[in-house]
């Protein structure tokens, strides 16, 4: 028995849901970033799976997943720089204490 | 029960297990370790899908660079950090209900739609990496150049934001 596209889509769906739950409930901002990375990885699995099992198999999905990886790396670098600057000024990395625009 | 199925089963189990352990651990350093397991397993899934170049890039970028960058972020902030979760439990339950509803909806959508029959993979003599290179530098050359500009902007922006302020000479 061969692996169908539905199995890959289900793995990506479970990964996306776990990442979404982590991004919604965790307090530490680094953990929220990690969860967002999980969601981006789930999308990449979908792109690569469709580029093999889709109606027109081509390498376009591979190229788009490479672009997504690059954007995710840039996002993580900028977000960690923001976190370090915030920690230096406010001594916290919890997302529910970053409320200086609310007061 | 072919070898492909067994490999897919083991790799997807490692992927989802790493993600679930990542959510349920409390110490942040352990979270990054299990995240590395998830990333390497996803690279194995890519290789299983016939995308060797994307798999190698996944190992290099995600399990190499991003995990180390996360460790740096943890060490530079609170290195004995532990995430005990939000205090208010109704928010957790609300998030769980929302995520479960999304999962059910997407699961129903995936199961009920008709996917095209898997095409017989014609063994092309052009290798995967060569085809990716040809496509990137011919058809997608403008997004490729834009990505390089984006990386430069992110590099400069990260350095400027993480720089120590106040000690101007």
Image (cartoon, coloured by chain):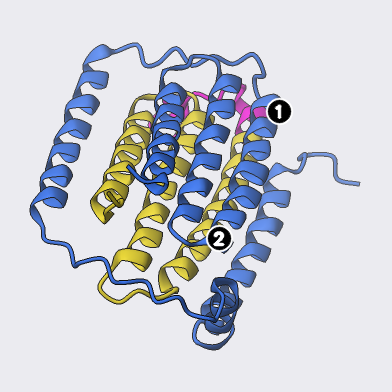
Where B30 sits versus A85, above or below? above
Q: Provide residue B56's location: percent of width, then percent of height.
A: 61, 55
Where A71 sits versus A20, above or below? below
Q: Residue furthest toward the right?
A: B169
The blue chain is B
Q: Of B30 and B134, which appears nearest the observer?
A: B134
Secondary structure under tag 2 reads: helix
**What stretch of residues is rendered in magenta?**
A86-103
Q: Colour of chain A?
A: yellow
Left or right side of B93 for A33: right
> Quarter of the image holding residue B66?
top right
Chain identifier of the residue bearing label 1 in the image: B
Residue B121: say if magenta: no
Q: Of B21 and A6, which appears nearest the observer?
A: A6
> Quarter of the image holding residue B97?
top left
Left or right side of A36 for A6: left
């Amino acid at each position: 028995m061969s692996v169908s596209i539905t199995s890959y889509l289900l793995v990506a769906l479970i990964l996306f849901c776990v990442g979404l739950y982590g991004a919604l409930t965790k307090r530490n901002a680094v953990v929220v970033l990690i969860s967002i990375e999980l969601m981006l990885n789930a999308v990449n699995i979908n792109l690569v799976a469709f580029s093999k099992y889709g109606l027109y198999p081509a390498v376009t999905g591979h190229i788009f997943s490479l672009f997504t990886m690059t954007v995710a790396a840039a996002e993580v670098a900028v977000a960690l720089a923001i976190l370090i600057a915030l920690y230096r000024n406010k001594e916290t990395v919890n997302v529910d204490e970053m409320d200086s625009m609310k007061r | 029960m072919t070898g492909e199925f067994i490999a897919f089963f083991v790799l997807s189990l490692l992927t989802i297990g790493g993600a679930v352990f990542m959510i349920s651990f409390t110490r942040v350093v352990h979270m990054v370790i299990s995240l590395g397991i998830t990333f390497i397993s996803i690279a194995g899934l890519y290789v299983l899908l016939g995308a060797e170049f994307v798999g190698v890039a996944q190992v290099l970028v995600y399990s190499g660079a991003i995990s180390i960058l996360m460790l740096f972020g943890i060490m530079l902030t609170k290195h004995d950090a532990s995430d005990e979760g939000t205090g208010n439990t109704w928010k957790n339950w609300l998030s769980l209900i929302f995520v479960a509803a999304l999962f059910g909806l997407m699961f129903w959508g995936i199961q009920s739609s008709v996917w095209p029959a898997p095409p017989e993979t014609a063994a092309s003599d052009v290798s995967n990496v060569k085809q990716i290179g040809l496509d990137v530098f011919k058809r997608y050359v403008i997004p490729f150049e834009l990505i390089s500009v984006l990386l430069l902007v992110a590099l400069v922006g990260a350095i400027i934001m993480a720089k120590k302020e106040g000690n101007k000479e």
